[in-house]
Amino acid sequence: MPRVRVNLKGKPSDYGLHPWIFKDKIKGVTGQGFEAAVFVKGKFFGSAFYNPEGKLALRFYSHDEEDFTAGLVYGRIQKARKEREEILGFKGSYRLFFAEADGMPGIIADVYGDGAVIQISSFGAEKLKREIVEGFRMAGYRWLYEKSNSYARRQEGLEPYEGWHYGEELAGDLRVKINDLSFRVPLGGQKTGLYLDQRLNWELVGRVMAGRKRVLDAFSYTGGFTLHLLKYGVEKVIAVDEDVEALNLLKGNVKDNGFNVNTVETYRANVFDMLDSFVLAHERFDSIILDPPAFAKGKNTHGAKRGYFTLFDRALRLLEEGGLLAAFSCSRHITHELLQNELSRAAKRLLREVKVLYRLHQSPDHPIPVYFPDAEYLRGFLAIVY
Ligand code: SAH
């Protein structure tokens, strides 16, 4: 039995199955601990992580009466695995837990072959970490690495943490296959190693840009887009990122997949400066990919709008007639409308004809619960420019 009993104001339908409850909705608390049995109108309503210090007081891991045990984690792994492998057909590497979307509040888990990387950003999950680790062992994962460095963690009063739980000796030089391509996975790199949320977009963008002569992959990281462009016969890719380690891995990935290393040029640079110098030098590309980091961390999107306007303006100056532009945003406050609006402002100034062919989203191993639309964060488009 959970140890804290929390009574909420109002009635169950005020809440639905939304995974969060803020402090101001709490009527009373009895007992102590960080697992709560939540009641509404005197009736059991759910089991949640309880953070007495935080504004975000309750984060539901279940609407049944159950403790957060290794057995529960094991069950969630089976459910999530089935969704990813049997329904989506993802093999070998995918996001297994997308936190609240999988009933695992503040817990992200990315599977890479026979092991996984977890990120913990909720107070309750931090306290119950032993159960999580045990659940992964029970489910047969041979190694488990933790990379808990998110901003959300600070908001819950937790320090960053990174390290091995078990199986370090088995992980070795990690490589995985995604969309038939081999990727090196740097556990010490960005995110959990790879931007798995782009998996379907890598494939789609590669397919639509197939056979192009000269494509710019701006904010390339380790080459998710670059590798797919090469797979689809693009003749030359220019990859730009400020992270030199990422560019070294990109070159390694190009080799591992047996592509000609001369088809890729890499530049360690600030993309904004690089775009300016390309414009000055009258360079031309027949397709451009822009996949920057989150420009807007909070609700204020002003700086982000300016950033996107600049990127779109430069991209339109560099694109040839009939060129393709794929652009992305990974902050949840930036909507498709906002992105498209900045694109339209840039197009208007340069009098270019621009048509959006596809609106793009995070891959479906990052699902969006209807009660929790905040889980939607990655948006983009693929447009044709004349
Ligand atoms: N497209 C990649 C993911 C990109 S993540 C993929 O699909 O795998 C964003 C990348 O932008 C990171 O690699 C980061 O190092 C890089 N970055 C951030 N700001 C930058 C800047 N101003 N100039 C160049 N690279 C930048």
Image (cartoon, grey):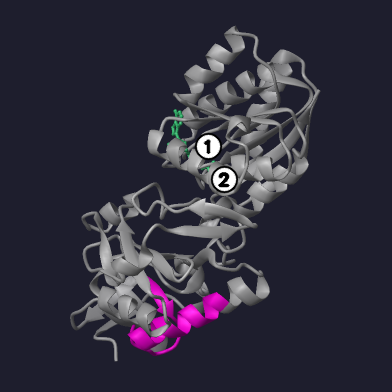
- Could you say where residue 324 lies in the image, as x and y percent from the top left? 74, 31
Q: Is mark 2 within 8 Å of ligand 1?
A: yes
The residue type indicated by label 2 comes to Gly
Q: Is mark 1 within 8 Å of ligand 1?
A: yes
State the separation of the CA atoms marked 1 and 2: 7 Å
Q: Nearer the viewer, residue 179 or 316?
A: 179
Q: Quadrant of residue 287?
A: top right
Q: Which residue is mark 2?
A: 224
Quarter of the image for the N terminus: give it: bottom left
Q: Nearer the viewer, residue 65 or 111?
A: 111
Please tell me how crowded label 2 is: few (under 14), some (14-19), or many (20+) other residues with Cα within 10 Å: many
**Residue contact at pointers 1 and 2, CB within 8 angstroms:** yes
Residue 376 lies left or right of residue 27; in this view the side is right
Q: Residue furthest left?
A: 32
Q: Quadrant of residue 130?
A: bottom left
- Could you say where residue 206 lies in the image, as x and y percent from the top left? 70, 43
- Could you say where residue 383 lies in the image, as x and y percent from the top left? 74, 35
35 to 252, vertically: above or below: below
The residue type indicated by label 1 comes to Ser
Please provide the residue range marked out in magenta.
59-81
Does the magenta run of residues contain 273?
A: no
Name which residue lies at 61% across and 57% down.
Answer: 363
- Could you say where residue 82 lies in the image, as x and y percent from the top left? 59, 79
Q: Which residue is mark 1?
A: 220
